[in-house]
Image: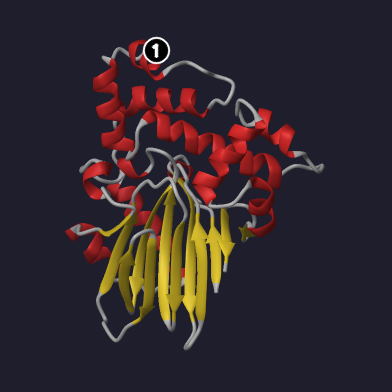
Amino acid sequence: MLKTITPSSPILKKYIECFYFYTGESNSKFSYLAFPHYHTGLSFFKGALIQRQPWRVDISESTRTDINLEILGKYTCPVLINYTGTLKEISIVFKPLGLNRFFRENYQSMAPQFSQELVNETWNNFGKNLLFEEGDLSHIESFLLSQCIENSAFMQLEESLLILANINDETSIAEIALKLGYHPKTFQRHFKKHIGCSPVEYRRICRFRNSITSKLNADQLKTLTEITYESGYFDQSYFIKEFRKLTNHNPKRFFKVANQVDGDKLVWEII
């Protein structure tokens, strides 16, 4: 039904976390909650009708033969994804700033909403040649390498992402901006343009994802107090408050319902 694969190309490994392939059978249903992430998903769909409601995407079997190209924007609350019937998906999960290496448009202009269709002639034409099988992978990697753009303009943004992802670094957003040679307001605009959210929101998401990694990948059982401070939260009450905003669950409940899909590359709540 669903399988994740890591890129084989060393270049692509720098920018892509994984690919995943989904195949839905006739009359099948599959639903999950996706939680805020610093990664970005871009998917090709075959035989699908895609409908959106607030914080919900319904993907159902269709007689249409064209290819849908969908891209996720940044979001800070759970998004419900429903699959129904026979359809196929190939998704590319990009690391932070990874997607920006393959498009000339900025991320915010491509994905201003939590979910939307991406209209891009080059990518849409490429999608028409996909068989939606694992055998497509080498073809996909070759295409991505042909579209890869090395851009030195992202060096400062990459440095800011490292600072914001460091749970032990409390440097303020204004201080980060000045360190990188930006006026704080200019930095905020530049960051949102290419990352899709504000630096404050990005830091929130990083702490949240770090807490998930700390808990799910730990060799020994960890208490919520340990996870709270390991993940850079001020105290446990703040940790719980943030979890409720980002997952609709308190931490204890979240870790009971969270599912690691095909290893730990994807963490969803499968419904």
Q: Quadrant of residue 53?
A: bottom left
Residue denoted by label 1: 175
Q: Which residue is at 30% across, 34% downward? A: 192
Q: Which residue is at 35% across, 22% downward? A: 156
Q: How many marks?
A: 1
Density class for disc 1 (Cα within 10 Å; few <14, some 14-19, many ≥20) is some
**What x and y, as percent, mark residue 180?**
34, 15
* Quarter of the image where the N terminus is located: bottom right
Q: Is residue 88 above or below residue 193?
A: below
Residue lying at the far right of the rendered structure: 220
* Quarter of the image where the C terminus is located: bottom right
Q: Is residue 64 left or right of residue 28?
A: left
Does residue 128 appear in this view?
no
Q: Quadrant of residue 41?
A: bottom left
Q: Is residue 48 above or below residue 211?
A: below
**What x and y, as percent, mark residue 191?**
31, 30
Q: Is residue 270 above or below residue 264?
A: below
Q: Which residue is at 21% across, 45% downward? A: 109
Does residue 201 appear in this view?
yes
**What x and y, as percent, mark residue 243?**
57, 43
Q: Report helix, strand or loop for mark 1.
A: helix
- Residue type at mark 1: give it: Glu
Q: Is residue 218 left or right of residue 49?
A: right
**What x and y, as percent, mark residue 249?**
59, 52
Q: Nearer the viewer, residue 60 or 52?
A: 52
Q: Name the colour scheme.
A: secondary structure
